[in-house]
Image (spheres, grey):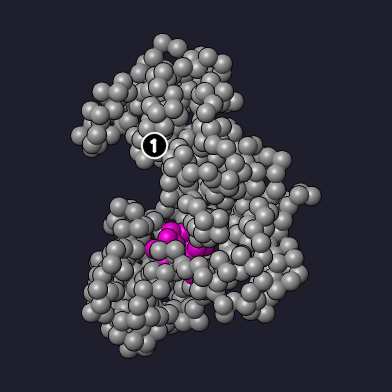
Amino acid sequence: MMSIQSVTALSPGVNSVTILGYGISARSTIDFLLEREPSIEIRVSELKARDCFAGIEDYEAKGVRFEFGQQTIDFILRDSVDSRFVMISPGIPPHAPVIKLIKDSQVDFGTDLDLFLDFAPGKKIAVTGTNGKTTTVSLLADIFDTQAIGNIGLPFMDFAKLKNQEVFVLEISSAQLFYSKLVKQVDCSVYLNFTDDHLDWHKDLAEYRLAKARLFEHDGVFILNQDDNVTASLKNDKSQLFSTEAQANAYYEDGALYLAESKLLDCAELQLVGKHNYSNILAASLGATEFGVKREDLETKLASFKAVPHRLEYITTVNGHKAYNDSKATNPDSAIKALESFDDCIAIIGGKDKNLDLREFIKIVSVRSSYIIIIGELRKKIAMALKNVAHADFSEAETLEQAVDLAIRHDSGLPIVLVPASSSFDMFKNYQERGDKFRQLIYTKSSGSCSI
């Protein structure tokens, strides 16, 4: 195993790592360094109070030093800039005061993605995009009989748990890309789409777009969405393109998926629904082919793959309504794509106000939904907008349970779709908790058993 001194983002002689933030990626990195590089000094600087965390004493007994409730430059850098690497957790936005301190100090910095890319053997296929990342990497991981790592599944530095791995499947967010320095070591990059999102983290859309594009600063293969102007603008002579609107290296046409102008599968054979999922499947198919997966094996994997939880996940039927959980639809574009999978439905929408442009979403949801139920911080803003839409039938609900009650009492028999178009932090810990609650409510009200 390589020494940490060989990480190309670091200056020679680095013998100490400071980690900003004490989340999952931080703990994974600490465990890795303690096992593989025990001579490295490790420090952790976390804004939250010490009593928010457990297990700190075990790490302290192994020599890890902590700072809680503040992030001071004296603790982070100690007395040396040249011998230290600062690992920034992706939850820390670029406008945070500590980031300016780090940049002004000239210390080497990066993320656990950088450490992973230097330490991990094998080929790396990395997926980014505003929507569809988790479905695509989950499908790729299933194809390669492995577990996805990064923004989903295992933290990057848990890669050693995947024994004898030849291909690593990575889900990478714009926040991880913003701080990382070693993305040139990726072998194949997949860019699914680009839409308005994460403006509560990035200062503007231009910064968000530039962060995503950093995943394509390498000499390997680019797999790009031909239907998206932003992703298509990155194509070069090595690019492989996918499309649901026209012929490309992989494309959708007349209810079937094609790979290299030869039919791969009829969409009726798939368990995923919606054109946005066909786009994800096409992207994954190109990635799998690039790494040598045989066509017959690919077809078998595609036909058996089920929807990832919280991504247009079918739950059960309640009071004549099929219920679908798309809690991961945390922005207007992903919500629109989910709605376009249905001719008509009952839509439960709303969540935290992220200052995103909701106009197109309001237009689509009012056309695709006979009945709309609004929850969350966005409730009043969306209700005001829907009052200006002719024939829009909507109600407001204080809780998700009230929203589900309203939906299942509707006598239309239409599908019920949780499609928030925003994040969950106003009412829930995360989109998973919101989706789990929705699933639990549906099972309970259908007199089924709840399994979370």
Does any portion of residue 336 appear in the rendered image? no
Magenta stretch holds residue 336: yes
The C terminus: image quadrant: bottom left
Does any portion of residue 22 appear in the rendered image? yes
> Label 1: how many residues lie within 10 Å, few (<14), some (14-19) or many (20+)?
some
Q: Nearer the viewer, residue 381 or 134?
A: 134
x 45%, y 12%: residue = 80
**Residue receiving disc 1:** 28
Q: Nearer the viewer, residue 2 or 79?
A: 2
Q: Nearer the viewer, residue 63 or 433?
A: 63
* Horizontal side of residue 70 vs 112, given as left or right: left
Identify the element where label 1 is drawn. helix
Can you tell which quarter of the image residue 381 is in? bottom left
Can you tell which quarter of the image residue 252 is in? bottom right
Q: Looking at the picture, how far across and down is residue 445, in whole percent?
A: 24, 77
Q: Residue furthest front?
A: 164
Q: Looking at the picture, how far across and down is residue 161, in whole percent?
A: 44, 42
x 56%, y 77%: residue = 269
Say if 320 sits above or below 350 in the image. Answer: below
Q: Looking at the picture, how far across and down is residue 65, in whole percent?
A: 31, 22
x 71%, y 40%: residue = 219
Q: Nearer the viewer, residue 213 or 33?
A: 33
Q: Which residues are magenta?
A: 326-338
x 24%, y 34%: residue = 55
Q: Looking at the picture, how far across and down is residue 3, in whole percent?
A: 52, 23
